[in-house]
Amino acid sequence: MARLYVMPGDMDAASVKEQRPVLDELAASSEDVTLDLSKTEFIDSSGVGALVFIYKRLLAGKLKLRVVGLKGQPLQLLTHLRLTDFVAR
């Protein structure tokens, strides 16, 4: 069973800083993580960095990150950056 976290809004520098304790906790999880970005309308480089950080930490522990609910700019950005390995299809 995966741990589910619903991101409450955008993933920009300010919100990533505010969410840092939760994001660190997700990265240190002992189970797979599902991150629901259905409420996220914008991601900047800080948000991309946070996603990659969680993905790499989980991967090192042989765990998976699954991102669901992507739409609009976040989906376009992650697709453009070819960071779709963890995007649920």
Image: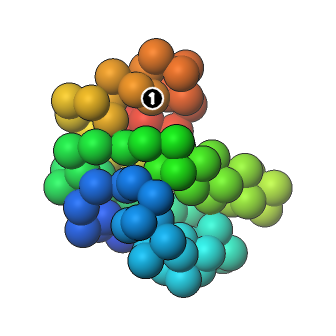
Instruction: Judge whether 78 appears above or below 25 on screen.
Output: above
Residue beneath the point at 46% across and 16% down: 80
Residue beneath the point at 72% across and 50% down: 56
Residue 58 is situated, as x and y percent measured from the top left of the image, at 69, 59
Please say whether residue 52 is visible from this viewpoint.
yes
Dot 1: element:
helix
Residue 63 is situated, as x and y percent measured from the top left of the image, at 67, 57
Residue 59 is situated, as x and y percent measured from the top left of the image, at 73, 51
* Residue 57 location, quadrant: bottom right
* Residue 14 location, quadrant: bottom left
Please say whether residue 34 is visible from this viewpoint.
no
Q: Nearer the viewer, residue 64 or 53?
A: 53
Work out which residue is located at the far front of the displayed protein and give it: 14
The quadrant in which the C terminus is found is top left
Work out which residue is located at the far right of the displayed protein and give it: 60
Q: Amino acid at mark 1?
A: Leu
Q: Residues within 10 Å of mark 1 (few under 14, many from 20)?
A: some
* Residue 8 location, quadrant: bottom left
Residue beneath the point at 63% across and 68% down: 27
Q: Nearer the viewer, residue 46 or 38?
A: 46
Dot 1 corresponds to which residue? 78
Instruction: Judge whether 47 appears above or below 3 on screen.
Output: above
Q: From the viewer's perspective, is 32 left or right of 70?
A: right
Residue beneath the point at 43% across and 20% down: 79
Q: From the viewer's perspective, is 64 left or right of 68?
A: right
Instruction: Judge whether 70 appears above or below 63 on screen.
Output: above
